[in-house]
Structures are given as C-alpha cells and as structure tokens.
C-alpha cells in the first residue's frame, strides 16, 4: 500500500512567485503521510508569451523550482513527481522542453520524460494553442522503477493517444502519471472520460494532478484550466477528485488491484495482427 498525494496548483507566469505555494502543499502532503507526491504540468509557471518564457525559464541544472523541490523530497523522504517544468534546451531552434521529473527520497532525479504529443489545437475562435511553436516534442516513452511500483510517465495531451499507455502497461507499468494543465473547455467535456478509459484499457492506476482556475499573465491575456485532479483505479472508478481549488488530494493505492484487474480482463495479452485499412 502506498499513499499518494495529488497537488493541485493555480500558478502564474512567475516561477519564483509560484514556488512557495508549491512547497507548502508538498510539505502538507508529506505531513499527511504521502510517500508519493505529484504536482501538475508546468509546475514552475504558465505563460502564452514565448518571450516571457525565455526570460524566466532556465536549463534543468539551473532551475530554482527543481532544486528546491529536490531538497524538499530529500528532507521529507518522499518520492516526488514534478509533473513537468518548462525548461530551456540547447536545441538550435531555441524551443523549450516540457519535462516531467521523478525525484527519489535522496533528492536525486531518477527519471525524466519529455512530453511527446504537442497541444496544437483550435478549441474555439478565441482558444487557439500551438504548443509546438515553443516546445519541442520528446520521442521516448519512459518507465520508471521505484520500490513501490513501476511508473509510466506521461503529460497532459498525451492522454489522447492510447497507444502510448498500452505500450507502457505492456512494459510493466502499474501506475500511469498524467500531470496536466488541461484547458477548461476540453476538460469539462473529456478529462474524466479519457483518464478512466486509460485506466480501464491498461489495468493501471492513473494519477492526474492538475492546474486549476484562471492563470494571470504579465505579458498576455491569461488562461483558464480545468482542475479536478483525479486518481482512477485499474477497474476504472474514480478514487479521489481534487475539485477546483488548489490543495492536496490524498489516495491510498493497493497495487494488488492491478493484477486483479488484468486477471479479470487480460486484454493486454490479446493483441492480434490485422490487415488494412
């Protein structure tokens, strides 16, 4: 049994200003007995301005949010999934990384995953996103080993691509992480359904810490995210729901339920080749 904590945030576009609230909630989660704490996508800050992002993002080795949260994980003796950070890269085109980082109880980064699928969509006439303009996509699925579970790491928009989750599950994942800053329009329509589907298809626990509310920007109009951090069981039922306020949602995970769900419906072993279309 492992107690997990989903940290729900409402960040601005200022990483330094966001950090104290994040630290406070991570400490609250650890004090409540969580051995695995998860924060949302872009824990360090949300911004639609590429120029602003370039001015406040740092390379991984110099990122204040990462350094501080590594120290918090070590001090509390917890596993900490930093859902993702916006980070500078050395890419020739100057694009950023949207990187999820798993930190161990020793404060060391144990696994890194760069978001593969970019949110390039026209949600409505006023809600248009081109994530790939600023972020370069990753190209590698990541399965992390911990003493309590094997963790398949994903980020937000990845949730619409079930092949990634199936591959992680067939490689041995027992927990799938989906930290997110889900748009409030698509979130209301699809968030819970997608997360429950990924859990049912794979027989995994799905843990999805989320950004929530309106996120002000110094160099833009701001944006709104859906909230409702969710923990979903391998059989598909919602175990915990974070609602719409920033805070900590606790959930106890019995990993034996993974094997139980896969025994009842062993669909991960039933792939067949087929022709067409």
Image: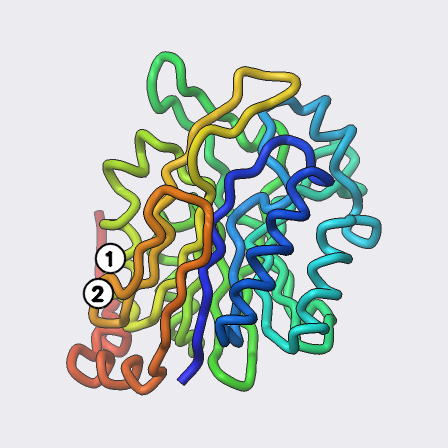
| Residue closer to the observer: 237 or 171 | 237
- Are the residues at dot 2 and dot 1 in contact (C-beta closer than 8 Å)? yes
Foreground label between 2 and 1? 2
Q: Earlier in the sequence, mark 2 or mark 1?
A: 1
The quadrant where residue 219 appears: top right
The quadrant where residue 27 appears: bottom right
Horizontal and vertical percent for residue 62? 83, 49
State the SS at label 2.
loop
State the SS at label 1.
helix
Dot 2: few (<14), some (14–19), or many (≥20) neighbours within 10 Å? Answer: many
Dot 1: few (<14), some (14–19), or many (≥20) neighbours within 10 Å? Answer: some
Horizontal and vertical percent for residue 48? 58, 24
Horizontal and vertical percent for residue 189? 23, 37
- CA separation in Å, label 2 and label 1: 7 Å
Residue at the image position 56 percent from the left and 80 percent from the top: 146
As drawn, which residue projects farthest toward the top? 125
Rendering colour mode: rainbow
Residue at the image position 56 percent from the left and 70 percent from the top: 30
Horizontal and vertical percent for residue 132? 57, 32
Question: Compared to 133, does 39 lie above or below?
Answer: below
Q: Which residue is mark 2?
A: 236
Question: Compared to 158, does 26 lie above or below?
Answer: below
Residue at the image position 71 percent from the left and 24 percent from the top: 52
Instruction: Work out which quarter of the rendered image holds the N terminus and state it.
Output: bottom left
Q: How many marks?
A: 2
**Residue 197 bears which disc, if any?**
1
Residue at the image position 48 percent from the left and 25 percent from the top: 223
Question: Compared to 187, does 77 lie above or below?
Answer: below
């Amino acid at each position: 049994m492992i107690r997990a904590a989903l940290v729900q945030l409402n960040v601005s576009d200022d990483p330094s200003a966001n950090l104290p609230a994040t630290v406070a909630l991570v400490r609250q989660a650890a004090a409540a007995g969580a051995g695995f704490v998860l924060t949302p996508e872009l824990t360090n800050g949300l911004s639609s301005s590429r120029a602003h992002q370039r001015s406040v993002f740092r390379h991984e080795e110099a990122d204040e949010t990462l350094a501080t949260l590594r120290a918090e994980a070590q001090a509390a003796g917890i596993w900490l999934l930093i859902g993702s950070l916006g980070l500078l890269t050395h890419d020739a085109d100057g694009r950023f990384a949207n990187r999820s980082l798993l930190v161990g109880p020793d404060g060391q980064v144990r696994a890194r995953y760069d978001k593969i699928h970019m949110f390039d969509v026209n949600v409505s006439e006023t809600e248009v996103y081109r994530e790939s303009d600023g972020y370069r996509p990753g190209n590698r699925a990541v399965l992390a080993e911990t003493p309590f579970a094997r963790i398949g790491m994903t980020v937000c928009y990845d949730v619409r691509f079930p092949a990634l989750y199936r591959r992680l599950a067939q490689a041995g994942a027992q927990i799938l992480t989906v930290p997110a800053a889900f748009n409030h329009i698509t979130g209301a329509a699809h968030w819970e359904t997608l997360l429950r589907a990924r859990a049912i298809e794979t027989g995994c626990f799905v843990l999805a810490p989320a950004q929530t509310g309106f996120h002000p920007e110094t160099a833009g109009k701001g944006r709104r995210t859906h909230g409702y951090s969710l923990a979903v069981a391998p059989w598909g039922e919602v175990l915990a729901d974070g609602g719409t306020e920033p805070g900590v949602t606790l959930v106890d995970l019995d990993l034996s339920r993974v094997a139980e769900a896969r025994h009842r419906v062993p669909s991960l072993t039933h792939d067949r080749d087929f022709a067409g279309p």
